[in-house]
Amino acid sequence: MSHDKNGESRIVEKFGLILHKYLTPVYEALNGLKKDVDGLKKDVNELKGLKKDVQELKDIQLRMENKLVDDNKLLHDRDDIHDKKLKDHEKRITRLEDTI
């Protein structure tokens, strides 16, 4: 191989063209992948936000369900108390009727 300037410059030029031909698509693909990864990161962050929102809604629903259960128990307890009072009144009335 000759070491003259023309020969070297042609080799460097061919080498540069070969590198450009084969490396440019790789860099373009890498840039595309980087954009895709950035987009996925954004999507993941949005999903995390949605997951947090869904969890908050579930917590609200659970609190509402617990409140309804507590209210229902309270109503049943009140009904039981009223039933007991009614029975007591009926007993008194029956005793009064018996005495009259």
Image (tube, rainbow, N blue to C red):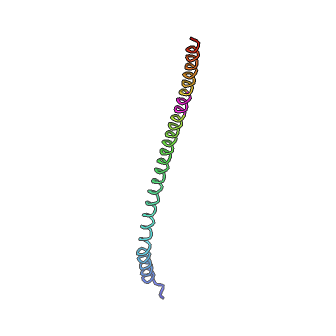
At horizontal 51% and vertical 35% (from top left) the residue drawn is 68
Left or right: 74 as drawn, with respect to 30: right
Q: Quadrant of the C terminus?
A: top right
Depth check: give the residue in front, 89 or 33: 89
On screen, residue 25 above or below 11: above
Residue 64 on image: x %, y % = 50, 36
Left or right: 69 as drawn, with respect to 17: right
- Residue at the limit of the structure toward the top, as seen here: 100
On screen, residue 17 above or below 50: below
Residue 74 highlighted magenta (yes or no): yes
Residue 13 on image: x %, y % = 42, 78
Q: What count of labels does the image hold?
A: 0
Q: In which quarter of the image is residue 27?
A: bottom left
The boundaries of the magenta stretch are 70-77
Residue 23 on image: x %, y % = 44, 72
Left or right: 57 as drawn, with respect to 91: left
Residue 33 on image: x %, y % = 45, 64
At horizontal 44% and vertical 70% (from top left) the residue drawn is 26
Q: In which quarter of the image is residue 93?
A: top right
Left or right: 11 as drawn, with respect to 89: left
Depth check: give the residue in front, 41 or 89: 89
Residue 60 highlighted magenta (yes or no): no
Which secondary structure dominates the residues rendered in magenta?
Answer: helix
- Residue at the limit of the structure toward the bottom, as seen here: 1
On screen, residue 78 above or below 93: below
